[in-house]
């Protein structure tokens, strides 16, 4: 059974703080993704990675960066959190040769 | 650029009634379409993909390239079908990523 885990279910940070969201998958998947999920806006792709140390911008990368030092771990970084980054963040992973994405439980981030 | 449109934010039906969740897409190439579902307090998961032409939990979806649609249908809704449904489009150009619609919340009342 595919397992995608995220480091926190709920997180509260202050404006200007540096925030790290961690995602780990245990299925040796090549592909990993970070989305934010907002009511009325659906899922929007922030960044994705097809291999270790490789990253590509998604549709809304501004204000975010990512790191993939190991195949199983994909981190999302908010360099200086702002209130408009309050959202649900979803991580997903998938095998390199298929289109299927497996999602983590999400991290609900609140920036005060 | 590709786009997925789900025109209804909320669809409310009674148990036993037919359900159709609409999805339209915009993409100049050959699309692959998916439906993902998120039940309350659960993670987002794949429901079905058009290339499989399968029925999952009684749901079916047919890709209509002429109308650029991929509507999700079920003849008799159940209360456990209540969830958020997302239509997604996979493109075949460049990196293969999914573009999601804004989602439709389905509420099935007893």
Image (spheres, rainbow, N blue to C red):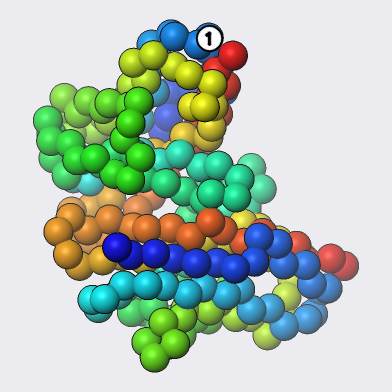
x and y percent of residue B5 in the render?
Answer: 50, 67
Asked which quadrant contains residue B16, the reply is bottom right
Give left or right: position of B93 versus B22: left
Mark 1 packing: few (<14 Cα in 10 Å), some, or many (20+)? some
Q: Is residue A27 visible?
A: no
Which residue was labeled with disc 1?
A14
**SS at circle 1:** loop
When the figure is inspected, residue B52 is found, relative to residue A53, above or below; the finding is below
User: A105 or B35: which is nearer to us?
Assistant: B35
Residue that appears at 22% across and 46% down: A31
User: B41 or A26: which is nearer to us?
Assistant: B41
Subunit bearing disc 1? A
When the figure is inspected, residue A109 is found, relative to residue B1, above or below; the finding is above
Give left or right: position of B73 versus B109: left
Residue that appears at 48% across and 55% down: B45
When the figure is inspected, residue A78 is found, relative to residue B101, above or below; the finding is above
Q: Residue furthest right?
A: B110
Asked which quadrant contains residue A65, the reply is top left
x and y percent of residue A107 in the render?
Answer: 50, 29
Give left or right: position of A74 versus B44: left
User: B69 or A102: which is nearer to us?
Assistant: B69
Residue that appears at 79% across and 72% down: B13
x and y percent of residue B85 in the render?
Answer: 57, 61
Residue that appears at 35% across and 53% down: A101
x and y percent of residue B11 in the render?
Answer: 72, 67
Q: Is residue B20 visible?
A: yes
């Amino acid at each position: 059974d595919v397992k995608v885990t995220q480091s926190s279910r709920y997180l509260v940070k202050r404006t200007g703080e540096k925030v790290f969201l961690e995602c780990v998958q245990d299925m040796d998947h090549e592909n990993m993704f970070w989305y934010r999920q907002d009511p009325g806006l659906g899922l929007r792709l922030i960044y994705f990675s097809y291999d270790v140390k490789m990253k590509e911008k998604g549709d809304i990368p501004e204000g975010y960066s990512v790191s993939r030092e190991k195949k199983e771990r994909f981190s999302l970084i908010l360099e200086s959190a702002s209130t408009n980054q309050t959202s649900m963040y979803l991580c997903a992973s998938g095998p390199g040769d298929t289109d299927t994405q497996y999602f983590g439980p999400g991290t609900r981030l609140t920036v005060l | 650029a590709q786009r997925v449109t789900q025109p209804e934010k909320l669809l409310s039906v009674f148990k036993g009634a037919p359900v159709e969740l609409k999805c339209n897409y915009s993409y100049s190439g050959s699309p692959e379409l998916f439906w993902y579902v998120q039940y309350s307090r659960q993670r987002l998961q794949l429901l079905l993909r058009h290339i499989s032409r399968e029925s999952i939990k009684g749901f079916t979806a047919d890709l209509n390239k002429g109308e650029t649609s991929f509507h999700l249908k079920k003849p008799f809704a159940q209360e456990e079908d209540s969830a958020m449904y997302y239509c997604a489009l996979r493109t075949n150009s460049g990196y293969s990523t999914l573009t999601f619609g804004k989602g439709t919340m389905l509420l099935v009342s007893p």
